[in-house]
Image: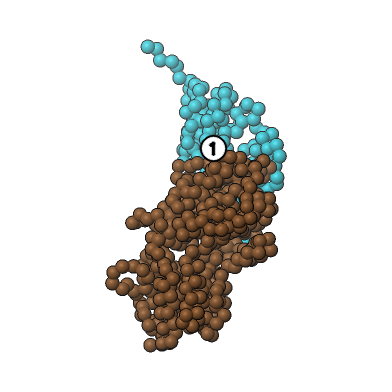
Amino acid sequence: MSKGVLATDKRGVRELGAEKKVGWDEVPQGVVLNSFDDNVDNLSHLRPEERPYSDFNSFTATVASWRVIKPVYNRDICIDCQNCWVWCPDTSIISRDKQMIGIDYDHCKGCGVCVEVCPTNPKSLLMFTEAVDNEEALSGWPEKKKKEKK
Amino acid sequence: MAKKFELNEVEVWDGNYAASQALRQAQVDVVAAYPITPSTPIVENYGAYQANGFVDGEFVMVESEHGAMSGCVGAAAAGGRVATATSSQGFALMTEVLYQASGMRMPIVLTVVNRALASPLNVRGDHSDMYLGRDSGWIQLDAFNSQEAYDLTLCAFKIAEHLDVRLPTMVHQDGFTTSHKAQNVRPLQDEVAYKFVGDYKPVDDMLDFTRPVTHGAQTEEDWHFEHKAKQHKALMDSPKVIDEVFKEFKELTGREYKRVESYMMDDAEVAMVILGSSVETAVLAAKELREKEGIKVGIIAPRNFRPFPFDLIRDELDRENLKAVVCMDKSAPGGAMGALFNEVAGALTSTKARPMVTNYIYGLGGRDFSIEEAQRIMKEQKAHADAGHITTQIQQFSGVRGPKLGFYETRRGK
């Protein structure tokens, strides 16, 4: 897994709303939030972890505190089809060079869409409650289902 | 490139046409509008200018006034010069978005043709819609005739878009008495008007892709208060820019505007505080009363309804010779004293002179306000002054049929 790609490596260190509180004279005019600290150019050619996201961008904060179930990803079964990456409504599937890397747990809300759209047998993504450890989840992964004969 | 519109030195324009010409000359990028009487001709004329090549910007026809102001907010956030027009029920429907526009600091110009609010349904002019906007965080300028509707609309862009202000601005004129009354208007030539207004200077525009921004974020108890405080400070500081713009406009045209207009106040014993097209009626009434009966009447007319010119009103009314002030409210007060009374009385509590203050509700739904009635009210103020106390109830109604209607007695000086 490449370094600095997952939220916990670089960001997600604070809850949304934990930024420095300033007075009326310092708040931005008109409730405008800058996405980036600097001017940006050619943004689409920069990977998220390379972009100068500001403190007011949710990239730098975890917004997943209300999640109760989570997707767990099984690298051994995944075929890198990118279906989950396409369908995730919170851009919380992390993929590099068309290779699936993992889940961004600081932004994933636990909706389960990735599991629904996963085409493998068994699925490469399954939902578990937050309390279940990922290693534990992977150790009990279901076997391939055989096609039922008619 | 927009075509130049040939204009004579003196044109005969009603208030609507005057406002639409000012919008055209400002070369607005986006007008999103929905028609409503009596302001319909503003956007109707503007649509014609656009169709005939006199405007480069976009004209967006929307499904409602809520949509109109929403379109304006979107276009302003994108980074354009934006304006629209409305009245009455349309204004009421816009209200939700008016607060968004001011909180988001979008310098939109809204030309409002004042009209009564239903029910009963009424298309005539009173100040119900103007009053409805008074807490919306917009700057409100009040034009008393067509020339002023034109002049103040040009000034409104310059005020709203000033980098120290960045607040949306309304220019009010009275429905029918101003909007549909053709008068001599001296317009500026297109290039002169545009040069006065100046190029639009975008701030935090969403179309600047090198600096992406989110507009209109949600804030709860941790941030909301600071943003509203900053917004109020901008509104309270805006008079400096308003005065500068009025000064520059005077240098260009010779026409002088003040945040509070005053007439014959120097030696006034009684004064009438009044808004809109009725100001001219009141001035005529006062002049005649001075000539015929020697009653020293002065008139105070706030040009700037928001931010309310607390300081200037206080300066004008803190005079030893001034004994009685009547505040004329052309809006149903809804279970209180009229708003103008409350504002003026509030300013007067910290004066040395502490003149007596009374309130009249008049002209609702376009009921005529005559010179004779203005003089009757002025003479009543003179009677208060002579008696040394308010001789009537504090709030009264002018021009309504039926038994005399009034509320509250004074506790001072009886």
Instruction: Tell me the colour chain B is drawn in.
Output: brown
Residue A58 vs B367, above or below: the answer is above
Occupied quadrant, residue B164: bottom right
Residue B105 in sight here = no
Task: Using the image as rendered, state which of residue B129 and residue A110 is in the foreground.
Answer: B129
Residue B176 in the image: x percent, y percent? 45, 57
Q: Secondary structure at mark 1?
A: loop
Q: Is residue B28 visible?
A: yes
Q: Identity of the amino acid at label 1?
A: Asp
Residue depicted at 40% across the width and 64% down the height:
B368
Q: Is residue B278 left or right of residue A7?
A: left
What percent of the width, then of the height, locates residue B276?
Answer: 49, 64
User: Which residue in the structure is indicated by mark 1?
Assistant: A90
Q: Residue at x 70, y 45 (%)?
A: A39
Residue at the image point whose x is 55% and y is 46% from the top = B46
Residue furthest left in the image: B403
Query: Chain A rendered in what hue?
Result: cyan
Q: Nearer the viewer, residue B57 or A127?
A: B57
* Residue in view at x 43 percent, y 59 percent: B125
- Image position, residue B220 (x, y; %): 51, 55
Q: Foreground residue, B282 or A84?
A: B282
| Quarter of the view holding residue A60 | top right
* Residue B50, picture quadrant: top right
